[in-house]
Image (tube, rainbow, N blue to C red):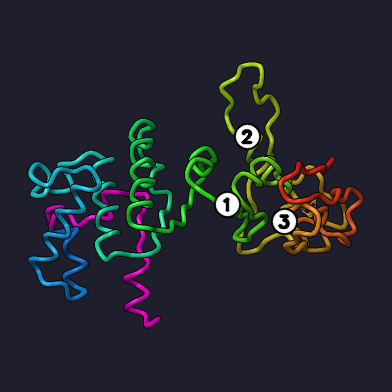
Amino acid sequence: LPMKAFRSQVQMVFQDSYSSLNPRLTIEESVAFTPRVHGVPPREATERARYLLERVGLEPKRFAGRYPHELSGGQRQRVNIARALALRPRLVILDEAVSALDKSVEAQVLNLLLDLKAEFDLTYVFISHDLNVIRYLCDRVMVMYLGKVVEIGDTESVYANPAHPYTRALLASMPSMDPDHRTLAAPLAGDPPNPINPPPGCSFHPRCARAEPICERRAPVLSDALAGHPVSCLMAMPDGGHSLPMRRMTPGLHAATP
Ligand code: SF4
């Protein structure tokens, strides 16, 4: 695709709803701005903006003429979503797009995103640290550590059978509502090392409960041979050289890592 066409098909929504919007434009002008730049006649761009504001739950009669500072954080994020949809993209990248919102507002915006996804036939790339939100919204999940993919698979498969020690630690650190299942020991110790100068071998080894001397020398690669979905850990590689290799499993069954 030529760059201009590609740009119109991929849009982004960022975490900071306020700095993403021009404070001197009304929200209608903000949403209409991008289609106008892409050659849509002004009147049609305004109509499209009003339609999208309506779709994201901001009634144009009440909201179209407002400025960003006159809106709440949740309302501003709705404007950013409307603006992202104004070029009729196929892919929307949501970078921590709901992280700054109150929990109740976050839930409303997540449901809105699900509705819009179905209505406009969208694909989302949803970047988040919130494992509950990821599980709610995503079909597939990719876990990254120090800029590298360590595990990837269907959300249900990864949540039911987390195979990489980092994924396991992340899931173990999720707060539980059940007082009988409190997290007592910290699932993960230490801070992430400097990504500019990552540790040799497996970059997770300084923090990994399963690290062995070979992990300091040998860098694992993604392999789906044992875990049922791709995992980057010597335990998940058939010839990884780790003393505790996973038992081979069929996709969908529970991983048998000790
Ligand atoms: S390769 Fe070794 S250090 Fe890295 S995640 Fe696997 S067990 Fe841990």
Observer-side mark, 1 or 2, equals 1
Q: Residue furthest bottom?
A: 2
Amino acid type at mark 2: Ser
Q: Nearer the viewer, residue 155 or 33?
A: 155
Q: Is residue 47 left or right of residue 140?
A: left
In the rendering, which numbered label is found on residue 231?
A: 3
- Residue 21 magenta: yes
Residue 62: x %, y % from top left: 9, 41
Amino acid type at mark 3: Val
Query: Callout 3: helix, strand or loop?
Result: loop
Residue 3: x %, y % from top left: 36, 80
Bounds of the magenta span? 1-28
Q: Nearer the viewer, residue 102 or 184?
A: 102
Q: Are marks 1 and 2 in contact (CB under 8 Å)?
A: no
Query: Callout 2: helix, strand or loop?
Result: loop
Instruction: Report the residue marked by disc 1.
Output: 141
Instruction: Report the residue marked by disc 2.
Output: 173
- Who comes first in sequence, dot 1 or dot 2? 1
Query: Callout 1: helix, strand or loop?
Result: strand
Amino acid type at mark 1: Val
- Residue 8 magenta: yes
Q: Nearer the viewer, residue 136 or 93?
A: 136
Q: Is residue 87 above or below residue 251?
A: below
- Who comes first in sequence, dot 3 or dot 2? 2
Please give the name of the residue rendered at 11% of the width and 72% of the height, measured from the top-left corner: 41
- Who comes first in sequence, dot 1 or dot 3? 1
Please give the name of the residue rendered at 12% of the width and 53% of the height, measured from the top-left corner: 26
Observer-side mark, 3 or 2, equals 3
- The quarter of the picture where the C terminus appears is top right
